[in-house]
Image (spheres, helix red, strand yellow):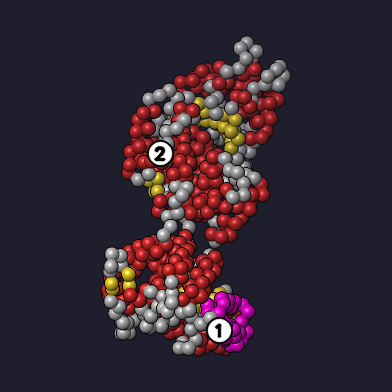
Amino acid sequence: MNTRDFLSDIYSDFFGIEKLEAENEKMRKELGLDKVEVPVIEVKKPGTAVVEGEKLTGTANEKEKDLRDKEMVRWFTKIDEMYITDASKNFLKKIIEYMRKYNEQIEKSYISFHMQIVTKNKEIVEDVAQILHESNKRFAYLKSGNIGKVSMYDVGRKEDISRTYVERNSIVVLKDLKGLDLAEERLKDVVLYAIEENVSSATNKTITIVSGSSKDEINSFFAKNSNLLEKNFSFVVEEAVPDTQDVYNDILKRLEGNMELSDEMKVSLLDYISNTYSKTSLDFPAYRDNLYNSIVFNKEIPKYHADKSLEEIFADLNELVGLQKVKKVLNDLVDLIELKNKTKDDLKIKDINLHMVFLGNPGTGKTTVARIIAEILYNLNYIKQNKLIEVSSKDLVGEYVGQTAPKTMSVVEKALGGVLFVDEAYSLASGGREGNGFNEEAIATLIQAMENYRDNLVVIFAGYTEEMQDFLNANSGIVSRIGYTLEFDDYTPDELIAIFNGMMKKSGFIVTDDAITEVRKLIDEYKGTKNFGNARFVRSVYEKSILKHASNTKNKKRKSILKTITKEDISAEDLLKM
């Protein structure tokens, strides 16, 4: 990379080096220096914009300029990668640019860049301090020195503050502000006086950083001297909390340097972060490090489990696209259970039969709704455990005489206290060994368990609408023990697009209109094929597109590019192999 050209673009686009007169006026206003005289530097433009004052003083050569430019590129790149607001990024870049101009005598006025950093992420404070320290070493804007840190838990007297400024520190970080709450009132006055004494000194060329987890915490720290805060710490750097995609990219980058991740693990990682990060009480570094360490140690992505309130469960249900008939049945069912629970024995409501049959094509939400039903029934104390045991015929039917009943009962016992979900249940009526009765034995065992454990087990049979008729006719005892039958309609193309958008949004991506058009073409192409997977099909497109996007952007760093799914990312590869 030609760093001079890169920096020239930055100066031109961001700082307006080609329009230095206007930029000087703009910066004076932004920094509150309207009344300070700043010399106007004449711009010369022989082919490419070069500011006369840009030349390093004395015998500066091209090698020194290149080194300076490379350092600035590195600092600016580091700032762009930080989880702070765009305004904060611009402010930090302007500080570095101002230091450079001051060093090269383009700017004549010295400014004390004392600042607040509002964040729970300690890495942000460390990174800002380090960048300012390194740029000071290059441009000698502050006094020569190191980074000094003062925890308010350790402050016992005025000298503890003053010593930090005296001991060759060019950057002073005041942290753990709540620690001062434990001090006596007199010590609070002394500490604030010591800070004011040092930040107001014209000869004490330092940058003081006050770090707090919130504006309220910082305001509380300066409560006894609010003028000190307003007068000397008007510059603010604010955290921009990483979103799901930021967290995923960060952890994925760390993991790929230490272990091999399959495509399935990458998708599971994204799902786990999507379901847990927004609900954690940890700050970003702690969440990231805990998850990273867990994955490296266990060599697998953690499973997501969480108990929810009834309101949260129905919020999840209502977020599901379509399924209007299913949602109505579940709302009515919950109202009935709550009425029974509230009235106890006052109303003669018979016991509710909650064994169910789900009818619908693949990918219409049957398994997802079964999980939500398990959460609902657990929340209403109808089942003792929030668990869903998902099985198919192969988990129930034995291979030789005498094996099927024990095998089926083993599954039933595992599901006791929760919900047993038998997927593709129609295979029990058609998929067993012809003439040996193994499938009939499994059905009979299930029917008996549904009767014997009706107070401790809910059984849901699911499968294609037409094929399930054979299953229901296989044993007359099945239908009599079913309390609810829910029909799951196929999704419309618009609903499938909404599902795709929802998956991408939950994962932190932005999808362009051209990409959506490409997805719609795939839906229209495949929707009429046999065993079209509905949401399962969309999920496959989603997963394959993320993997293709990762490949397409492997050499990119700009977050806006990393977070945007384009037409080129939409993958139709191997969709028929779902």
Task: Decide: is 482 above or below 182.
Answer: above
Residue topped by disc 1? 165
The kind of secondary structure element at disc 2 is loop
* The quarter of the displayed image where residue 43 is located: bottom left
Q: In this image, 131 relative to 230: left or right?
A: right
Residue topped by disc 2? 570
Task: Decide: is 527 above or below 173.
Answer: above
Instruction: List x then y, in percent, for residue 500.
Output: 41, 40
Residue at coordinates 43% horizontally, 84% vertically from top-left?
Answer: 227
Which label was assigned to residue 251? Answer: none
| Dot 1 crowding, Cα within 10 Å, few <14, some 14–19, many 20+ | many
Name the kind of residue labelled 2 in the image: Ile
Residue 175 in sight in this render: yes
Q: In this image, 453 relative to 380: left or right?
A: right
Magenta region includes residue 153: yes
Q: Give the range drawn in magenta.
A: 145-172
Calculate the distance from the C-alpha at mark 1 to the C-alpha at mark 2. Answer: 56 Å
- Could you tell which of marks 1 and 2 lies nearer the N-terminus? 1
Residue at coordinates 43% horizontally, 68% vertically from top-left?
Answer: 62
| Dot 2 crowding, Cα within 10 Å, few <14, some 14–19, many 20+ | many
The single residue placed furthest to the top in the displayed view is 435
